[in-house]
């Protein structure tokens, strides 16, 4: 199997997840060989794990009070091993990040992880890219998302998911309000799956016969290197324009997307979402949104939803706070004048205080940089 080294979307590059070396006690093969991970907050193992070790580690995950980051990518984990590890998640309340890409979990392993998501309330990042997962596994993972509130990012690059699996994920997005990032690049999603995602992104208003289906509450959806047609791409772009929670919707390198749809993607969609991404990035970098879980590469997830779901987002856009020109225009304003600006009217007092403090800090930083 080839490692998914990176996937380039509109503006986010996602490298293989790595641990933050500053976090807690790091462990590896030595602790695994000793069958003792007591006190380990991260475990990195990059050789053949072996079935016995996988079964032992899965069992050790039950109620483990310490381990937060577990990296088992490219360790030749098979279906039975994946099932054992997934079982360990079912009542684990500590593990936040599990990297399992470049293995052999296949559908049966993904089904086990889907089942674990129904009961797990701790895991926030799961990478199952390059695991030979098809629609059966995708459907199970989507069912797991329907009952899960904790997972923030799910990576499924380089698998074999087609329209059936895509439609299941689209249905899950109408229910799940925790997932911020879903990566489905390099699969086999075509027109039906693309249209299902468009419906999920757009939501559906209530009618006399049916309840409202809310718009997908997600920040980033990437479906690059698939089989989306012009019809599907246009529908996704239409829906994404009206879903202001989204800061990245990547459809690059869908070779059945051509002509007017491809031109629209380049000339309209990409610039719009490049701007949204800048706003989302500014909100994260200034810590107006985000959480204590700052271990994701790329865009973080705000505990209250995607960055652009923050009440600060429309204010940042109106005042152009994410741009040098926007900050320059505020160079001579003080705390009182900033608080009194009309753009601030919709913020609660505490939110206004926080934003004004950030603005003054950003302006001072920009001014200091200009004077060097």
Image (tube, grey):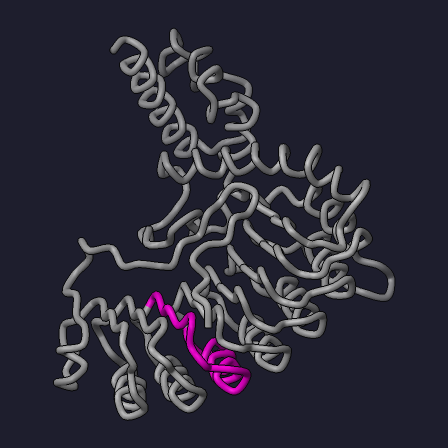
Q: Which residues make up the magenta segment?
A: 96-120
Please give the name of the residue rendered at 35% of the width and 84% of the height, measured from the top-left corner: 88
Residue 118 located within the stretch drawn in magenta = yes
x and y percentages locating residue 270 in the rendered image:
63, 37
**Would residue 236 be found to the left or right of residue 58 on screen?**
right
Please give the name of the residue rendered at 57% of the width and 35% of the height, measured from the top-left corner: 274
Q: Can you see residue 83?
A: yes
**Would residue 226 be found to the left or right of residue 101 on screen?**
right
Image height check: is 222 above or below 270?
below
Most foreground residue, 26 or 78: 78
Residue 295 located within the stretch drawn in magenta = no
Count the marks. 0
**Would residue 318 be found to the left or right of residue 214 on screen?**
left
- Quadrant in the picture for the C terminus: top left
Which picture quadrant has residue 318? top right
x and y percentages locating residue 107 in the rendered image:
55, 83
Most foreground residue, 196 or 316: 196
x and y percentages locating residue 14 in the rendered image:
44, 52
């Amino acid at each position: 199997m080839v490692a998914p080294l990176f996937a380039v979307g509109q503006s986010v590059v996602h490298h293989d997840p790595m641990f933050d070396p500053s976090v807690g006690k790091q462990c590896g093969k030595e602790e695994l060989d000793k069958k003792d991970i007591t006190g380990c907050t991260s475990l990195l193992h990059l050789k053949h794990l072996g079935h016995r070790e996988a079964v032992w580690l899965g069992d050790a995950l039950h109620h483990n009070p310490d381990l937060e980051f577990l990296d088992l990518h490219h360790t030749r984990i098979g279906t039975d091993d994946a099932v054992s590890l997934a079982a360990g998640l079912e009542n684990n309340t500590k593990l936040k990040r599990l990297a399992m890409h470049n293995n052999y979990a296949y559908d049966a392993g993904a089904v086990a992880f889907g089942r674990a998501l129904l009961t797990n309330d701790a895991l926030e990042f799961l990478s199952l890219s390059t695991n030979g997962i098809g629609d059966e596994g995708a459907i199970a993972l989507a069912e797991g998302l329907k009952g899960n509130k904790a997972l923030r990012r799910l990576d499924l690059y380089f698998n074999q998911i087609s329209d059936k699996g895509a439609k299941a994920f689209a249905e899950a997005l109408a229910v799940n309000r925790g997932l911020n990032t879903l990566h489905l690049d390099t699969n086999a999603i075509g027109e039906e799956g693309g249209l299902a995602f468009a419906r999920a992104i757009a939501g559906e208003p209530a009618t006399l016969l049916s309840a409202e289906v809310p718009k997908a509450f997600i920040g980033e959806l990437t479906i690059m290197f698939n089989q989306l047609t012009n019809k599907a791409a246009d529908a996704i772009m239409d829906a994404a324009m009206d879903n202001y929670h989204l800061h990245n919707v990547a459809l690059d390198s869908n070779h059945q997307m051509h002509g007017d749809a491809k031109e629209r993607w380049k000339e309209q969609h990409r610039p719009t979402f490049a701007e949204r991404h800048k706003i989302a990035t500014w909100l994260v970098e200034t810590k107006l949104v985000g959480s204590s879980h700052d271990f994701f590469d790329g865009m973080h997830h705000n505990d209250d939803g995607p960055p652009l779901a923050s009440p600060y987002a429309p204010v940042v856009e109106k005042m152009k706070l994410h741009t040098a020109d926007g900050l320059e225009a505020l160079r001579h304003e003080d705390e009182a004048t900033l608080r009194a600006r009309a753009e601030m009217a919709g913020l609660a007092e505490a939110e206004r205080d926080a934003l004004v403090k950030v603005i003054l800090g950003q302006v001072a930083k920009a001014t200091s940089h200009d004077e060097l």
